[in-house]
Every structure is written in structure tokens, then in C-alpha cells.
Amino acid sequence: EAQVTQNPRYLITVTGKKLTVTCSQNMNHEYMSWYRQDPGLGLRQIYYSMNVEVTDKGDVPEGYKVSRKEKRNFPLILESPSPNQTSLYFCASSPHLGTSGGLTGELFFGEGSRLTVL
Amino acid sequence: SQQGEEDPQALSIQEGENATMNCSYKTSINNLQWYRQNSGRGLVHLILIRSNEREKHSGRLRVTLDTSKKSSSLLITASRAADTASYFCAGYNTNAGKSTFGDGTTLTVKP
């Protein structure tokens, strides 16, 4: 089954304790992205990756790191979490538009990771 | 802030009625997509309309796009209780390589 898998789905942690949220997709998609969803603020992009070893900042990258060492995996790292990073996080992937390149922008989302930082 | 703005923020209708949601965006797009999100779950892609298209249908969904007004609408016909969810528009720009989401419309369909 084609899917984007995130772990953990739920996590409660304390300020300053490093954590990693993993994301894996089995659709051979080049593009992967992380979003956070907060009430009243919609979905905001944190980081994205066009391909292996290529990552770029989104709209709200502060306090986050990512890596893309393999095509299927795109972990989100919070080196020193703070309470303002309490949020619902989504990983998403998107395919390239065949050999002509370019993206349709259609995103396939994981089920989300609800993070609480105390 | 998000590029897209959905209107209304919340919509409550009876089963069988039609639901119309509107979306406005600010910058240039190559396509616009609509997604659905059940409470606390991941977003699911519903339909994509390209910037050179004006209307598109998929089952009970009808999407329109007016690039001159930078707006789109999503119509769900003959709504069902199972359509209860939040609906988001997302404008995609190829050059930016990203989709920018609106704040969503929460639809409640009462049985």
C-alpha cells in the first residue's frame, strides 16, 4: 500500500530534550516536506527536500533541522524543543511529473505526529 | 500568514444539501488543489485544477478557478454525513516548488 509513515504519532516531551520525528514514504517520490498545523494558522511549511541531499527552508524553519540521506526518509529533528513547538506535524511527499520534470504539487500526507513540549 | 483564505471558516448544512466553499489566493499559481482532513488526521488530496482550466468535476465535487480574481470554489453536491471534515485549498507554484495552504473551512453535515 502506498503510504507516508510518521513516527511517533504522539509524543509528550520536556523542554530541551532532543527528539526526532521520522518520516518514510514507499512511493519513490523525489519531493518531501514537513508542515506544522496550529489552530488559526493553518498549515505552515517547515522544510522541504527536492531530492536526496537537497533540503531547503520553508516558512517556519527556526528550531528545526532535517536531513535527506535516502530518498524514502526525511526525518525532522528538534535539537532543543520549546513549548512553542507544541503542534501537529505532518510529513508529505510528492512525485515528479515523469521525465519532463517538474511537480504537480499533489501531496501525499502522513497521519500526523502530535507533539507536546512541556 | 497563509496565502490562501477560505470562506466561510465554518459551514453547517443538512444531509442532501450542497456545500460551497471559496478560496482566495494572493500570488501566481500553476495549479490549485483541494484537500480534505478528517479531525486530527492527515490531509487527503481531492482534486487538482490547473491554471489554464476553469472548471473540473470529480464525482460529487465541482471545482472552479478564476485566475483573474485569484479565487476558486469547491462545490460538494448531495452532501452526506461522511463529508464532515475540514477542507483546504492549496495553491501550487512551480518556480517556488511548494504548495501554500489556506486556513480551511470546517464543514459539518447533519444527518
Image: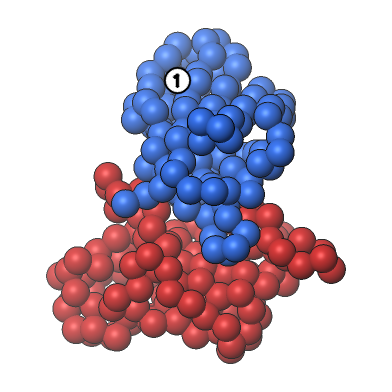
Q: Quadrant of the N terminus of chain A?
A: bottom right
Residue at screen point 45% across, 81% down: A66
In this rendering, position of residue B107 left or right of residue A23: left
Crowdedness near tag 1: few (<14), some (14–19) or many (≥20) residues, C-alpha within 10 Å: many
Q: Identity of the amino acid at label 1?
A: Val
Residue at 58%, 48% (x, y): give it: B29
Locate residue B78: give its quadrant: top right
Position of A107 compared to A86: left or right?
Answer: right
Secondary structure under tag 1 reads strand
Residue drawn at point x = 41 percent, y = 48 percent: B3
Quarter of the C terminus of chain A within the rendering: bottom left
Give the residue displayed 30% in from the left and 65% down from the top.
A115
Colour chain A is painted in:
red
| Residue ranking furthest to the front | B68
Outermost residue toward the right?
Answer: A99
Tell me, yes or no, if residue B50 can be seen here: yes
Residue B93 coordinates in the image, percent (x, y): 58, 55
Question: x%, y% of residue B48?
Answer: 66, 41
Q: What colour scheme has been applied to the protein in the rendered image?
A: by chain
Pinpoint residue B26: horizontal percent, then vertical percent.
Answer: 44, 44
The residue where tag 1 is placed is B109
Q: Is residue A41 above or below residue B79?
A: below
Identify the colour of chain B in the image.
blue
Q: Nearer the viewer, residue A52 or B29?
A: B29
Foreground residue, A58 or B17? A58
Please determine whether, in this image, residue B76 is positioned above or below residue A53: above
